[in-house]
Image (tube, helix red, strand yellow):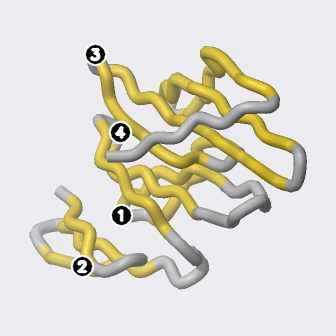
Amino acid sequence: MQLSIGNNSYLFQDNGEIKIKTFNNFIDVNKFETKYGLMITEDNGEWVSYLYNVTENGAEEVAYGNFQHVFEYNNKVYAISSLSHLTSHHSGLHEIRKFDDKFVKITIFRTEKSRISANN
C-alpha cells in the first residue's frame, strides 16, 4: 500500500515498517493511482518529460512524453499526452501495458495541430 503525502512524497510499508520516500527532482508533479501502482508525471511546460511508476525501490521510467492525465478504463491504463509550443500543438491517447516486467506505451491515436485536455 502507498499513500501520497505532500507534493513529492509518499508513504509505503516495507517488511511491516512504514517508510517515506521523497523525490526532490520533480518540479510540478501529477499523481495517478493505477493497477500498476502510483504513476506520476512532471509538468515541464514545452520541455518533454516522462511518465514514472513509483514503487518502494524508487521511480521507474514508463514512457517519454508530456502526459497530462492517466486513467483506467475496462481494466486498462491510459495516458493522455499534450504538448504546445509556439505554433506546434500535438496530443495523443496511449495505452500503458506491462510485458515481462517492462512498460510499453502503445499509441492509439495522435493529433497534429490540436490539443486534448483532460480535466477531472
Judged left or right of residue 47, residue 78 is left
Residue 36's disc number: 4
Specify the amino acid type for callout 3: Asn
Disc 3 to disc 2: CB gap under 8 Å: no
In space, the residues marked 1 and 4 are separated at their CA atoms by: 13 Å
Residue at image position (58%, 43%) is: 62
Crowd tier of the residue under label 3, counting other residues whose Cα lies within 10 Å: few below 14, some 14–19, many 20 or above: few
The residue that disc 1 covers is 56
The residue that disc 2 covers is 19
Figure quadrant of residue 85:
bottom right
Residue 74's disc number: 3
Location of residue 117 in the rendering, given as x and y in whole percent from the top left corner: 52, 40
Closer to viewer: mark 1 or mark 4: 4
In space, the residues marked 2 and 4 are separated at their CA atoms by: 20 Å
**Secondary structure state at the residue bearing disc 1:** loop
Crowd tier of the residue under label 4, counting other residues whose Cα lies within 10 Å: few below 14, some 14–19, many 20 or above: some
Quadrant where the N terminus sits is bottom left
First in residue order: circle 3 vs circle 2: 2
Residue at image position (58%, 63%) is: 42
Specify the amino acid type for callout 4: Tyr
